[in-house]
Amino acid sequence: MKIEVIPEEAIRSRVADLLTEQLKHNPKSVLGMTTGSSPLKYGIYREWIRREQAGELAFHEAKFVNPDELVGIPADHPESYRSYMREHLFSQLQTLRSEPHIPDGYATDLLAECRRFDQLLADLGYVDWQLMGLGLNGHIAFIEPSDHIPAKTYISQLFEENRPTQSLHFRSEDEVPKRSITIGLEAVMKAKSIVLVAAGENKADMVARAFSGPITTCVPASFLQLHANATIILDPAAARRI
Ligand code: GLP
């Protein structure tokens, strides 16, 4: 694992440069995506779309995979991660050819869906290049802090603060997802390259715990310290305590 501290406004181009390098090296890369507020706030996906339009990036042979999805809402629900990805990235790419893979959080047999997703990842040869965010409680994908972390894809109980907020899209509190389907630690560690972005003052404590503290299941992101090819991109505010 290595840490880079760069100005917040440089994040979008640094991540796009790393993606460009990856696709140059392997145009058939399996690209792992992430949701959350950071890709939007720092313009990460907007920069890829801009570069694609400028002819600087192309995804013809690439495959996209998302590591997690909310449980209990259909794929076309406005709050699903599939909808997020469609709106902010996939629908805007001109060179995307293959159907992105995202776990089905509305499957009737969720355990079978977990096994299907593990098989899919194995068939793809795992992810070549994984973009990640850092949850304020130390989660990566939706691997929440716990006294144990499954190796395989599983159903995780979301911490209260990580549930989607009650909004017009949910008729009642009962409809707000409380679980997610997420890859386990095996698929994270088998990603050949990981780029994690964490920026802003509010991430500083967790950045210090995750990347300069002990490796513990209480901070799932701390396992990235063991990854041979993980790049942690921070802005000065998030790096303040390391
Ligand atoms: C969600 C996603 C995570 C992501 C996190 C980061 O919880 N499931 O994969 O890392 O958001 O959130 P943010 O970028 O909003 O801090």
Image (spheres, rainbow, N blue to C red):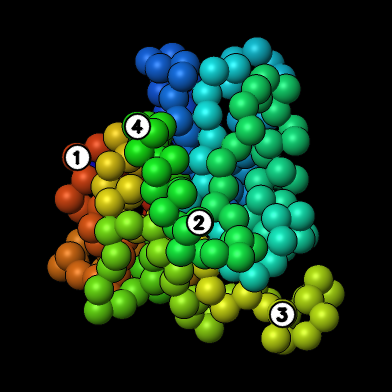
Q: Nearer the viewer's eye, disc 4 or disc 1?
A: 4
Q: CA distance from mark 3 to mark 1?
A: 40 Å
Q: Is ligand 1 closer than 8 angstroms to the Cβ of mark 3?
A: no
Q: Earlier in the sequence, mark 3 or mark 2?
A: 2
Residue in the image at 39% along x and 43% along y = 119
Q: Earlier in the sequence, mark 3 or mark 1?
A: 3
Q: Earlier in the sequence, mark 1 or mark 2?
A: 2
Disc 2 crowd, CA 10 A, few/some/many (<14, 14-19, 20+): many
Q: How many marks?
A: 4
Q: x and y percent of residue 163 in the render? A: 59, 76
Tell me the element at label 2.
Answer: helix
Q: Nearer the viewer's eye, disc 1 or disc 2?
A: 2
Query: Residue 113 — which label?
Result: 2
| Quarter of the N terminus within the rendering | top left
Location of residue 155 with respect to 237 vertically, above or below: below
Q: Earlier in the sequence, mark 4 or mark 1?
A: 4
